Image (tube, rainbow, N blue to C red):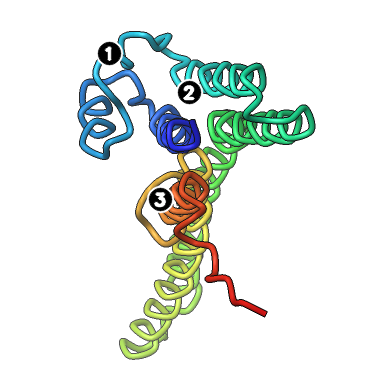
Amino acid sequence: VRGQCGRYMNLVLELGTLKARGSADSDQAKAFLERKGLLLEGEWELMVPGNRDITVCMWIGTILHEAYEDGLVSMEGLRILMSCLEKLQGLTYDLNVKLPLPYAGLVVLLVKVLLVAGCTEMGMQMAMDRHNAPGMGTVETILWAVVNFLCTGFLVCCFQGLIDLQAVLENPFGRLETHFATENQFYAMRRLASAFSQPEAYLPARTSS
């Protein structure tokens, strides 16, 4: 029972991550879970498409209830385990909550408008300065143009950072340094769940007094 619950807990975590990436119902997801040893034959067909992680949580709850009826778990233990199961389901739910970010698209639009306006204003200012100072030499003109180009480039880079931030906020799951380290976190949680399924291997040796 402990080993089966541990495998199902790992399966819930993996399904939650795959669901957040939009590939929980794909054949690639099934092959990946089978390759990891988390999915046995016939279990994939029993899951509800679109809510496979919730289906596995229901399986865990059923196993825990049967363990209580068989006297393997006390009422207090069942209450604690069901509370942990609820937290596990809440974790996968949080991964799949789509953040309401309509302002992100508006930020991108305003940034692009501001960039066009700023670059246009900078070019017109350079033309006006050139027209108002016909005696400006070639060296001064080149230096003034370089300074304006540097300022404009700095402005473009700053606002481009806002556009990149909007893209990260829309899909924070990836392999870039600015993304959430979900894979590392879930690998750590998978190892922890595996340890819980076999606690005897992680208990210290008893010493005789």
Q: Is residue 115 visible?
A: no
Relative to 28, residue 156 above or below? below
Q: SS of the residue at dot 3?
A: helix
Q: In which quadrant will I find the C terminus?
A: bottom right
- Closest to the observer: 137 or 89? 89
The span from disc 3 to disc 1 (Cα, nearest Å) is 27 Å
Q: Of the numbered discs in the image, which one, if any, rests on residue 74?
A: none
Q: CA distance from mark 2 to mark 1?
A: 16 Å
Which residue corresponds to mark 2? 53
Tag 1 residue: 42
Mark 1, secondary structure of its residue: loop
The numbered mark, 3 or 2, whose residue comes first in the sequence reads 2
Residue 14 left/right relative to 107: left
Residue sitting at 69 percent across and 28 percent down? 82
The reply to whether discs 3 and 1 touch (Cβ–Cβ < 8 Å) is no
In the image, what residue occupies the spot 58% across and 38% down? 104
Residue 64 picture location, percent across and down: 60, 24
- Indicate whether 198 appears above or below 137: above
Residue type beneath disc 3? Glu
Instruction: Please tell me which residue is depicted at 43% across the width and 14% down the height of the picture.
Output: 50
Q: Earlier in the sequence, mark 2 or mark 1?
A: 1
Residue type indicated by callout 2: Asp
Between tags 2 and 1, which lies in front?
1
Q: Residue 39, located in which quarter of the rendered image? A: top left
x, y (%) of residue 113?
52, 43
Residue nearest the viewer, comparing 40 with 86: 40
Residue for badge 3 = 183
